[in-house]
Amino acid sequence: MLLRDLRVLAEKATKGPWKVSGCNQGFQGNAPGGYITGQEQTGLYSKNDKGEFVPQMRTCVIATFPKGNLADAEYIAAVDPLIVIGLLDEIARLNQEIDNLYEDAAGEDI
C-alpha cells in the first residue's frame, strides 16, 4: 500500500480519538469482550459557549473484539486516523527535508 492510499483511508475513516471500552462486559448481548469507539458528526449543529455554530458529534462503535484480544484492540485504537495522518505528514516533512539536503549538497563543491 502506498502512503497516499493510506492517507485516503485515514481521511475517510471515523475521526478519532478512538478508545477501547467495555473490556469486561458484553456489547449489546454479544460474547464478553469490548469495543472501539470513535466520534462522527451527526449532521446537526449547535451553538457553543462563544456563540459559534459547531457540528454535533456522537460516539459510534468502530469495531468489537472478543475477550482476550485487549492488546489488539488497544493497538487499533491507538492508531486512529488522526495519528495516521500526523505520521504521514511527518514522513512528508522528512522527505522534503532530505530532498532539500540533496539539493544543498548538489550545489556545493565537494
Image (cartoon, helix red, strand yellow):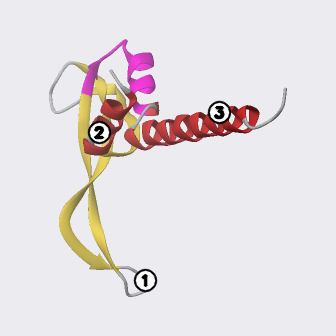
Residue at horizontal 40 percent and vertical 17 percent from the top: 72
Q: Earlier in the sequence, mark 3 or mark 1?
A: 1
Mark closest to the chain's N terminus, 2 or 3: 2
Q: Amino acid type of disc 1? A: Asp
Judge depth for marks 3 and 1 and give the one in front.
3
Is 30 on the left-hand or right-hand side of 8? left
Q: Position of residue 42 (x, y in %)?
A: 19, 61
Magenta-drawn segment: 64-77
Which disc, if any, is residue 8?
2
Task: Find the distance from the CA under tag 3 to the CA under tag 1.
Answer: 45 Å
Place of residue 22 in the rendered image (x, y in percent of width and height, measured from the top left)? 34, 32
Q: Report the quarter where the C terminus lies.
A: top right
Residue type at numbered disc 2: Val
Residue tagged 1: 49
Q: Which residue is mark 3?
A: 98
> Mark 3: which secondary structure?
helix
